[in-house]
Amino acid sequence: MSILPIYLYGTQVLRERAKPVRNIDNDVIKLVIDMIETMKKAPGDGLAANQVGSLQRIVVIDLADIEDDEDGKPLILINPEIMSSEGRVTMQEGCLSIPEFRADVERPGKLVLRYKDTNFQEHELNADDILARVIQHEVDHLNGVLFLDHVTKEQRNLQRDLLKDIQRGDIDVSYPVVIAEYSAQS
């Protein structure tokens, strides 16, 4: 098991669309295990493979701290696909790839998800509340979308200096990171 570095805002991999996993092999299982360890170390509620530099459609989620479920196992989503969603709920979000930046984001409150597990068996999941939000946030990552893309330009502009600091790696986090090559023109 390894703690993987988390790619920060400004790195190209966060803007790329992940490719479907075609089969489960030892490399995929190792990546899933490492992602879970990385997410717990950070600590976070979810982590997409893009955030650790891998363009595979893999998400891990662990809401045990939020839901007071110490026995709960992390949810592993391979090739997740949101089939439908409904309702609108606004909540504050943050992201391990954009540390210290938080903003209100409106998203559907319920969804139906299709995904495969580590045995490559297909499942369907009805999710609502925080689980639906985390799933949407992480699936966005797999599609090269950041939660910043859901906030107003004014909200981003208010935090422009923080975003530049994140790109440069001028932040204090408890986990290893990969920073973008910073350019004064960005």
Image: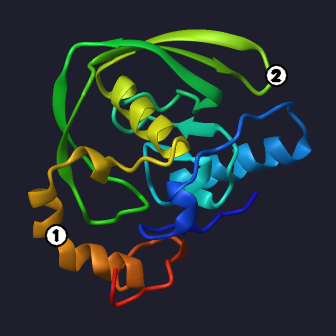
Left or right of residue 179, residue 68 in this image: left
The vertical placement of 155 against 119, above or below, is below
Furthest residue to the right? 25
Going 33% across and 86% down the picture, which residue do you hit? 185
Mark 2 / mark 1, whichever is N-terminal = 2
Splitting the image into 4 quarters, where does residue 118 fall? top right
Residue 39 at x, y percent in the picture: 53, 52
Give the position of the N terminus as an image quadrant: bottom right
Splitting the image into 4 quarters, where does residue 63 fall? top left
Q: Nearer the viewer, residue 33 or 148?
A: 148
Left or right of residue 168, residue 11 in this image: right
The vertical placement of 67 against 163, above or below, is above
Going 52% across and 11% down the picture, which residue do you hit? 125
Q: Does dot 2 land on a helix, a strand or a loop?
A: loop
Left or right of residue 52, residue 141 in this image: left
Give the residue number, with chain letter if any, for mark 1. Answer: 159
Give the residue number, with chain letter if any, for mark 2. Answer: 119
Left or right of residue 147, residue 19 in this image: right
